[in-house]
Image (tube, rainbow, N blue to C red):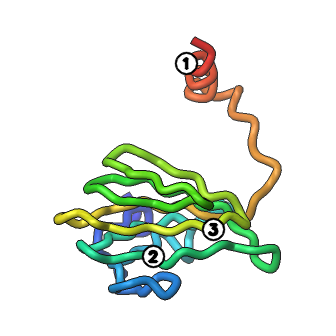
Amino acid sequence: MSETSIERAGEGGFPYLLHEGEAPVQAQWYFRTQTRLPVAVHRWVFPPGATEGNHAHGPDHPLDELYLLVTGRATMTLGAERVEMVAGDALLAPAGVEHGVRNDGPEPAEFVVVWGEPGEGFDWSPYGTGRAAEAAAES
């Protein structure tokens, strides 16, 4: 296996204060200089009490963001809604919609965050998981 085909947890990680939030998160940007995917893939670990300040990605730099909570609990805002999340929950923040994260829990909240410019989407139907997901949604 090539050394560039795996990136270990914590390699290249850095503390980062997100959008004027409270307390920095521990961030990692996976394969930042190597991937050809049209998205960024991050891991953000929010210590108890940390927040990502509420923000929106407007027309100058529109971004869609997908937040997948891996461990812990968190409260997210999406527009005027507050959503309580547990591990395994995901939230999609479309470009232009205000959103943010708060870890009110006693344990770290770890997210995988995938973000990129909105596009035309992709036809997943030729792939087995695409067909299985479609069948599951129809049943």
User: Of the residues shown, which amino acid type is indicated by label 1?
Assistant: Ala
The Cα–Cα distance between marks 2 and 1, rounded to whole angstroms, is 33 Å
As measured in the structure, the alpha-carbon distance from the residue carrying label 3 to the one carrying label 2 is 12 Å
**Residue for badge 3:** 98
Q: Where residue 136 is drawn, which disc sits there?
A: 1
Amino acid type, callout 3: Glu
Residue 120, image x and y in percent? 82, 49
Q: Residue at the location (37% across, 84% down)? A: 22
Amino acid residing under circle 2: Glu
* Viewer-nearest of discs 2 and 1: 2
Label 1 vs label 3, nearer the camera: 3
Tell me if 18 is positioned left or right of 47 in this view. right
Say which element carries label 2: strand
Residue under pointer 2 = 52
Q: Disc number at residue 37?
A: none
Q: Is residue 10 left or right of residue 5?
A: left
Residue under the image location 37 percent in, 67 percent down? 7
Q: Position of residue 109 (x, y in %)?
A: 29, 63
Task: Estimate the x, y position of residue 3 in percent, counting from the top left.
Answer: 38, 68
Query: Mark 1 vs mark 3: which is more N-terminal?
Result: 3
Q: Is residue 62 above or below residue 125?
A: below
Above/below status of 7 relative to 119: below
Quadrant housing the C terminus: top right
The one nearer the camera, 64 or 119, is 64
Dot 3 falls on a residue whose secondary structure is loop
Looking at marks 2 and 1 on the same chain, the residue that comes earlier in the sequence is marked by 2
